[in-house]
Amino acid sequence: MTGPATDPRRLVPRTDAVLAEPRIAAAVERLGRELVKRAVTTAQQRARRGEITPDAVPAAALGALPATATGLRPVLNATGVLLHTNLGRASLSAAAREALALAAGTCDVELDLETGGRGRRGQGAIDALLAAVPGAGAAHLANNGAAALALVATALAAGREIVIARGELVEIGDGFRIPDLLTSTGARLREIGTTNRVHVADYADAIGPDTAFILKVHPSNFLISGFTRAVGISELTGFGVPVVADIGSGLLAPHPLLPDEPDAAGALAAGATLVTASGDKLLGGPQAGLLLGAPGIGADLVQKIRRHPLARAMRVDKLTLAAFEATLRGPVPPTRRALDADPAELHARARRLAEQLTGHGVEAEAVDSAATVGGGGAPGVTLPSAAVALPERYAAALRAGDPAVLGRLEHGRCLLDLRALPAESDDALATAVLHAGAGRAR
Ligand SMILES: *Cc1c(COP(=O)(O)O)cnc(C)c1O
């Protein structure tokens, strides 16, 4: 006997009723009504098609809800690329994450709680930066490295000339080029030398009354070798014009594994007037642009630049300020820990994981691997690493998982390189591989 009264599709619960269920109501509190309603509607449609029973609608809706109200999904970075731009570059330290959560509410970012009056915005972040680079006389933060450079060019060189070597006209990524960025501010470029060679005399010839500053850009994502000649910062300090060094990666002091990567302290010690860098590369913090000035003229220029109208448009938010300060004052951030990881320890982790996975019937093997810094830093440098090698077909299933895992395809295998991953994530990695394997078997 079938009829409207007994048709199971008639028993599909109404939206209002589902939304009123306590667990669904709690999800509305957490994720907002629209997201939850959409999941409920989808579950109701599945029940009408007979894919699930009507009483399973609330559970199906709950199961389909995202973990958070963002479409962004967490990804375990098993690429062996420490700073993967497509994965958001540096992973923040626990201290920086806590600071983010604190700053997410109202906080004294621009208030002096003692007097009740206005305070300098983000003073704590600036103080932390100056403490980390004692050779600097003043500092400012902008949205990113490109913003810091654009601010310098706008405030100091609009309508004037920037002297730059042709070998330093860098395309930084996604089609964006430093020379285009500089000219977009109204500055003119005075290009000198050739792709492979430039001499102090080239700088001397180019400098004149129109020169605003000399710019040194670190070729952070390529190598030129062979018949080459570059001019160091220390050779450029005698011309009576500021020397601006865009060091890129945000190393604040030299790192033994990266002998060719310039650092802020070194650039200032060599005589740079201003230094610009990124906050989310080797510094290991949030996206930000560092501007550091040498004591004296450099510090005066920083003050001038930070009062320029455009500085307001490139102002960092409180979340960045909080995370940046905590990155510098807190424990060693993940990027730095990955850089300093002991290869023997990485191999031990890879063996443990491979053994564990093999025990569950996964074709896994611990192998040698080579990691890189990536993200526009230390080109050509490889860091010894270890990986778990899986059959190539795992790659897609791992990307579809939650958390997603991004590995590296090499010689027909999917390598999960451990250098960019903290040891604490090994369990999550193993679970993700087992899920990916199980998903394929179904
Ligand atoms: C990465 C980089 C930039 C751009 O910095 P963002 O923080 O990505 O804006 C500029 N210059 C150099 C040399 C770089 O390496």
Image (cartoon, rainbow, N blue to C red):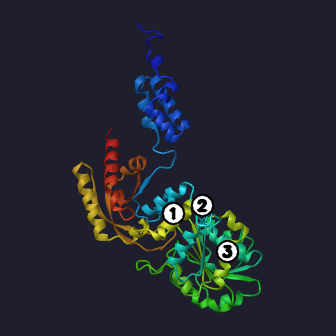
Q: CA distance from mark 1 to mark 3?
A: 24 Å
> Residue tagged by mark 2?
317
Tell me which residue sits at (73%, 79%) in the image.
Answer: 161
Q: Nearer the viewer, mark 1 or mark 3?
A: 1
Q: Residues within 10 Å of mark 3 (few under 14, many from 20)?
A: many
Is 363 situated above or below 309? above
Describe residue 302's horizontal placement relative to residue 230 as left or right.
Answer: right
| Amino acid at pointer 1 | Ala
Is 199 situated above or below 419? below
> Residue tagged by mark 3?
152
Q: Tag 1's secondary structure?
A: helix
Q: CA distance from mark 1 to mark 2?
A: 10 Å
Q: Position of residue 436 (x, y in %)?
A: 35, 46
| Image quarter of the N terminus | top left
Tell me which residue sits at (73%, 74%) in the image.
Answer: 187
User: Whereabouts is ligand 1, in terms of quadrant?
Assistant: bottom right
| Amino acid at pointer 3 | Val
Q: CA distance from mark 2 to mark 3?
A: 20 Å
Pick whichever of labels 1 and 2 is earlier in the sequence: 2
